């Protein structure tokens, strides 16, 4: 059976983080499955249009990628998204894949965080990636969603409370205010900020580390905290890329 591997990301217009995260993860998957051709798709039409206009970079959407794969006479498509949670984007992705599969067999891998072992695994990875001193708390910033899958962030935050780690989200729960309220109950007055996002794009550079008064960094500084920021997407971490490889391996079964 002739099989293709389609790696689907939301996408980014920041070429620096694209290379370190999306491309790095695609390369890790290509190494893990050397006999399988890897294809790329970005779900964001806005990102695709901006990449074309600004950099003359053509990236397929899901339908275009599936059409390209079908035209190349593949019998099976294994899809691995670089999403963090099975939220609205994952629901849309699955629907789009099924609608454009034609006669091809489709196997869709899971996002990074789906079950309790995934939550424990990412905490271990984050602890290793961002070790902090006793006077510092690590505060991770995720995206968040109104989708029921936001419960994953809530459960992850609960697990982190046993450690000098806290979590907030841009658009969900826990919010920035929730995290700051938790921090005020802790003795530490230093905060290490890091994005819990696959790529370190606009959200990381602006919502987290920006100079505007409503950025997470500015809000913490206004409360008297000494704040440092790591602008690094999760996809830059080899252990995270390996987690995606395992998700894809499970989909191949």
Image (cartoon, rainbow, N blue to C red):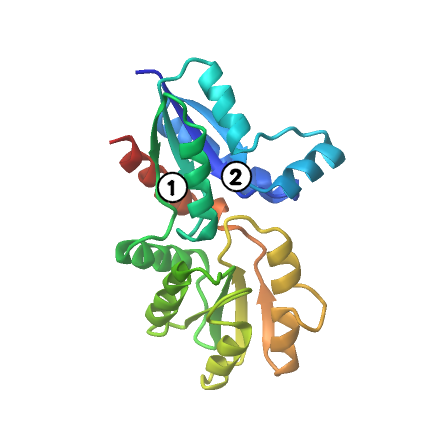
Q: Which mark is residue 22?
A: 2
Residue 9 in view: yes
Residue 116 location, quadrant: bottom left
Mark 2–mark 1 CB contact (< 8 Å): no
Indicate the secondary structure of the residue bearing disc 2: helix
Task: Please state the total of marks drawn on the protein image.
Answer: 2
Q: Nearer the viewer, residue 73 or 27?
A: 73
> Is residue 93 shown above or below 203?
above
> Is residue 7 shown above or below 128?
above
Residue at position x 35%, y 39% in the image: 109
Q: Nearer the viewer, residue 205 or 225?
A: 205
Q: Quadrant of the C terminus?
A: top left
> Is residue 211 shown above or below 110?
below
Q: Which residue bears the numbered disc 1?
A: 244
The disc, 2 or 1, on the residue closer to the chain's N-terminal end is: 2
* Residue 17 x/y as whole percent: 59, 44
Residue at position x 72%, y 68% in the image: 212
Q: Label 2 crowding class (10 Å Cα cut-off): few <14, some 14-19, many 20+?
A: many
């Amino acid at each position: 059976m002739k099989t293709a591997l389609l790696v689907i990301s939301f996408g980014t217009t920041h070429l620096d983080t694209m290379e370190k995260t999306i491309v790095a993860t695609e390369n890790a998957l290509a190494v893990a499955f050397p006999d399988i051709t890897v294809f790329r798709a970005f779900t964001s039409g806005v990102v695709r249009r901006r990449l074309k206009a600004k950099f003359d970079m053509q990236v397929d959407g899901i339908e275009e990628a599936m059409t390209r794969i079908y035209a190349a006479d593949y019998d099976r498509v294994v899809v691995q998204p670089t999403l963090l949670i099975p939220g609205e984007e994952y629901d849309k992705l699955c629907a789009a894949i099924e609608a454009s599969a034609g006669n091809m067999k489709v196997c869709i891998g899971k996002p990074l965080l789906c079950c309790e072992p995934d939550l424990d695994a990412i905490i271990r990875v984050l602890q290793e990636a961002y070790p902090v001193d006793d006077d510092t708390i690590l505060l991770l910033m995720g995206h968040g969603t109104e989708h029921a899958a936001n419960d994953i962030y809530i459960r992850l935050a609960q697990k982190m409370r046993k450690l000098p780690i806290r979590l907030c989200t841009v658009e969900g729960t826990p919010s920035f205010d929730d995290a700051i309220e938790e921090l005020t109950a802790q003795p530490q007055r230093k905060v290490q900020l890091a994005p819990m996002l696959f790529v370190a794009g606009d959200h990381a550079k602006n919502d987290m580390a920006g100079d505007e008064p409503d950025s997470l960094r500015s809000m913490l500084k206004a409360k008297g905290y000494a704040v440092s920021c790591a602008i690094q997407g999760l996809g830059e971490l080899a252990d995270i890329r390996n987690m995606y490889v395992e998700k894809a391996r499970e989909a191949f079964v």
